[in-house]
């Protein structure tokens, strides 16, 4: 699959996400501000997504700050601006307990989100790795638009908030959901791999204005559907824009449901792909020089 999911627990935000994921899976230097660490790593800043941003005073495309991530995902589901809210309430004469409660989004939770990892199918990310600037822009734009569409599908048809005794009542979050997206350009092995981490908060607003938690099981059950939709959207846009087509891929006696891109025109990078892959043994890691060749030029200047 091209979409993977894993739960985000409050402690993981400090031990893993704020140390590695936000800086492209590298190791964030100690005591380095988030923006400076991202610039050093050569990755863009995180961006907020989702229709539920308005209820939290955020806007689509707005930069994700460390304090916002810490509050929403690391502090068991608090308002991204909880620090500011608490200061204002204390200035108004509220007690520390009252101020703290004001900054909460409903009940505290241990599982604070779900990490969706989106990556194009191999034939497309190879085009991205070997292609020219225009090819990469087309693929990245298709990749981003597909993520938006998948998130909209999750908001409209998948996500449910459970409430009442034993979660007997279920309702779609009418205002939508909130997610932070982070762009990566390489896999942990060092090979070029366009992929985004979409950190989806489990917090959603109910019809009565209160905040509840999205049922994560429903998100897991629809991972395959999300992957299929993402693949279809990316392949369709990339093939239409670059003049490519898809064809079924046969493995042994079974025809897989996924597809690969087949050029209707001569690809500018075709000879580079043939040369680089000629020495690659299937099932083995590509050699260092191939890694180096693939990683050249995939980051925006």
Image (cartoon, rainbow, N blue to C red):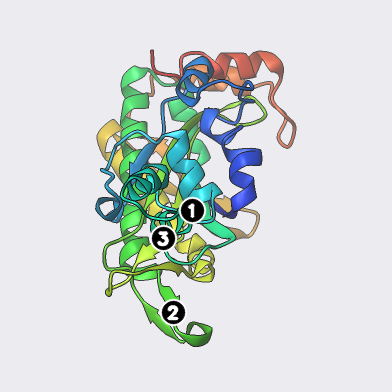
- Mark number displayed over residue 258: 1
Q: Determine the secondary structure under disc 1.
A: strand
Q: Quadrant of residue 98?
A: bottom left
Residue of label 2 = 163
Instruction: Tell me which label, 3 or 1, sits earlier in the chain.
Output: 3
Residue 96 appears in view: yes
x then y, percent, for residue 216: 52, 66
Marks 3 and 2: in contact by CB < 8 Å? Answer: no
125 above or below 105?
above
Q: Determine the secondary structure under disc 2.
A: strand
Alpha-carbon span between mark 3 and mark 1: 40 Å
Asked whether, in this view, residue 198 is left or right of residue 138, the answer is: right
284 above or below 73?
above
The residue mark sitting in front, 1 or 2, is 2
- Mark number displayed over residue 105: 3
Marks 1 and 3: in contact by CB < 8 Å? Answer: no
């Amino acid at each position: 699959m091209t979409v993977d999911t894993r739960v985000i627990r409050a402690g993981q935000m400090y031990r893993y996400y704020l140390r590695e994921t936000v800086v492209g899976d590298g190791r964030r230097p100690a005591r380095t501000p988030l923006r400076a660490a991202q610039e050093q790593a050569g990755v863009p800043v995180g961006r907020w997504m989702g229709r539920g941003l308005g209820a939290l005073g955020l806007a689509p495309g707005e930069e994700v700050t460390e304090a916002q991530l810490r509050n929403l995902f690391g502090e068991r589901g608090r308002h991204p601006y909880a620090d500011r809210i608490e200061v204002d309430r204390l200035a108004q004469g509220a007690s520390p307990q009252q101020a703290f409660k004001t900054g909460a989004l409903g009940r505290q939770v241990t599982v604070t989100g779900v990490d969706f990892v989106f990556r194009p199918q191999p034939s497309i990310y190879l085009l991205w790795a070997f292609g020219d600037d225009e090819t990469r822009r087309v693929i990245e734009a298709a990749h981003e638009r597909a993520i938006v569409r998948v998130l909209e599908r999750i908001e409209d048809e998948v996500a449910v908030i459970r409430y009442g005794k034993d979660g007997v009542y279920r309702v779609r979050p009418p205002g939508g959901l909130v997610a932070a997206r982070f762009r990566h350009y390489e896999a942990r092995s060092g090979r070029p791999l366009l992929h985004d981490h979409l950190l989806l908060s489990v917090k959603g607003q109910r019809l009565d204005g209160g905040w509840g938690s999205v049922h994560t099981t429903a998100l897991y059950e629809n991972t395959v559907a999300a992957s299929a939709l993402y693949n279809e959207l990316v392949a369709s846009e990339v093939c239409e824009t670059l003049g490519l087509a898809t064809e079924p891929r046969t493995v042994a006696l079974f025809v897989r449901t996924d597809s690969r891109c087949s050029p209707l025109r001569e690809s500018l990078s075709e000879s580079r792909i043939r040369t680089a892959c000629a020495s690659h043994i299937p099932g083995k890691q590509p050699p260092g020089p191939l890694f180096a060749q693939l990683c050249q030029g995939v980051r925006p200047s």
